[in-house]
Image: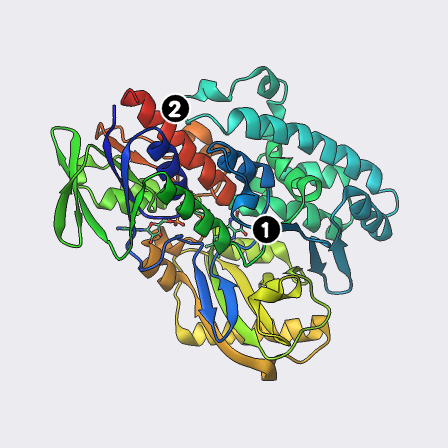
Amino acid sequence: MSKNIAIIGSGFSALSASCYLASSGHNVTVFEKNSTIGGRCRQLKKEGFTFDIGPSWYWMPDIFNKFFADFNKKTSDYYQLDKLSPAYKIFFKDDQITIGDTLDKICLEFERIEKGSSVPLKKFINKAASNYDIAINKVVLKPGLSPFELVTPETITRIDQFFKTISSEVRKNFKNPKLISTLEFPVLFLGAKPNKTPSFYNFMNYADFGLGTWHPKGGMYEIIKAMSALAESLGVLIKTDSNVSKIDVSDKKATSIVVNNKTLAFDIILSGADYHHSETLLDQEHRQYSENYWSKKTFAPSSLLFYIGFDKKLNNVQHHNLFFDTDFENHAKEIYDNPAWPKDPLFYANFPSVTDKSMAPEGSETGFFLIPIAPGIEDTPQIREQYLDIILNRFEKLTKQDVKNNIIFNESFCVNDFIEQYNSYKGNAYGMANTLLQTAFLRPNLKSKKVNNLYFTGQLTVPGPGVPPALISGKLVAELINKHHNA
Ligand SMILES: Cc1cc2nc3c(=O)[nH]c(=O)nc-3n(C[C@H](O)[C@H](O)[C@H](O)COP(=O)(O)OP(=O)(O)OC[C@H]3O[C@@H](n4cnc5c(N)ncnc54)[C@H](O)[C@@H]3O)c2cc1C
């Protein structure tokens, strides 16, 4: 039975859901408040430089392959995907670790840092590989409706891994602080501290060392272009500059949405905007979660970002670079425990033009810097400038070069922009963290418990933060809609 479905937002989860719903025969219209689609994965083009505004790490290529395969397509029908070699580089105070594109290369690097460490590394990655298989092929594909979804023959034998943390598991096997930081890095994508993340999530280490780091030529926005082309080919109507300001409900049924002050009727409403914001579009009595509920949740960090055009090629950097030359524990406390601007922040720097010439004019470098910060903290132009100075000083010292005098332009993005541009709760950058108590059925629901034909998708619901989970979230919600509405 074909339904008229409105989707709010055009991030990965919304676009994913739109493709599945349209291919099931529904009439789907996507309403995006901004003038360009893609949500947190938009693109900035300036003076010949191309920046991905949000995500830059292409991990778990299998999930992208599966998404396109569901529509008899391949990623290569839309974009060129290259495996990065090396995958990335980590700067410490007194050394640098380069993560190669194969486990053998990474083992050699681990041996250089700590003799004998390649033996526990191989075991650790083997375990992570089997967790990846279970997580991706069994657990993550469940809609988060009941605790029993997590109970499979495989998870039962691994139940202890839900109660131990990734941090304790890594420390049991490795003693060198640099190797510990390297192995704790991947779970930061899940939004919480490694000592709050169940060790079962070490499947992220397999995503990192086993599956590798990839780059779509032209940047991450190529995926958005691919998904919107696919969606449109399936009949989805995508409308930009279309702010949704209200979801009307009558008799426990969402009847219409208000778009740019016009009321439009639909059979089913699906929101891919931040869950907290989506509920504020409803009158109070139709909301499921109170402000108190949201305020008690662990949110993934917000970010201070800089997009910089450099008038020269930079030395000693790779496509992805992590600056772990300061104390992670202190920075993590300033994100999660006592929210404040970090005294000595870790940061990430991305130079896609190192491997992809299309991203910058010849002889120039495209630079994207990211400092993770607590959501909801004060954001002023002065603070942003101060932090740019802090990280560029450290960057110059660690990479042994001057860059401050080579900046053509510099644009920043922070808490206020996340709120203003995406209606993000407290300006979070990548949603609600995946901790033990915020996993699967314990996350905000894909379906409203109060309004019968209202659904949600995206990084605040299941499975959680990140581009691959967003693709899966769109698929899960589409399946749920089809199940409930007999498609
Ligand atoms: C700086 C940064 C770096 C990241 N790095 C990575 C990475 O390297 N790899 C990775 O996998 N993930 C990364 N992530 C996470 C990833 O980008 C997100 O998890 C994912 O893009 C979220 O998609 P989504 O579908 O949940 O929603 P969003 O992308 O947030 O899309 C929601 C959309 O809804 C729209 N909207 C909101 N309110 C309304 C309204 N009232 N009416 C109409 N439209 C509305 C918004 O404008 C937005 O377009 C990063 C995120 C950020 C911010």
Q: Position of residue 283 (x, y in %)?
A: 16, 41
The kind of residue tagged 2 is: Leu
The residue located at (35%, 51%) in the rendering is 425
Relative vertical location of residue 426 with respect to residue 476 in this rendering, above or below: below
The residue located at (64%, 40%) in the rendering is 207
Front in this rendered view, residue 108 or 433: 108
Q: Position of residue 114 (x, y in %)?
A: 84, 49
The residue that disc 2 covers is 145
Q: Position of residue 231 (x, y in %)?
A: 38, 42
Q: Residue furthest bottom?
A: 405
From the viewer's perspective, tell me whether residue 41 is left or right of residue 357: left
The disc at residue 137 is none
Q: Quadrant of the N terminus?
A: top left
Q: Quadrant of the C terminus?
A: top left
Front in this rendered view, residue 157 or 487: 487
The residue located at (36%, 44%) in the rendering is 232
Disc 1 CB within 8 Å of nearest ligand 1 atom? no
Image quadrant of residue 438?
Answer: top left
Front in this rendered view, residue 464 or 133: 133
The kind of residue tagged 1 is: Gln
How packed is label 2: few (under 14 Cα within 10 Å), some, or many (20 or more)? some
Pointers 1 and 2 in contact (C-beta within 8 Å): no
Q: Is residue 50 visible?
A: yes
Q: Residue furthest top?
A: 153
Helix, strand or loop at label 1? It is loop
The residue that disc 1 covers is 80
The label nearer to you, 1 versus 2, is 1
Relative vertical location of residue 337 with respect to residue 347 in this rendering, above or below: above
Helix, strand or loop at label 2? It is loop
Q: Is residue 165 visible?
A: no
Image quadrant of residue 59?
Answer: top right
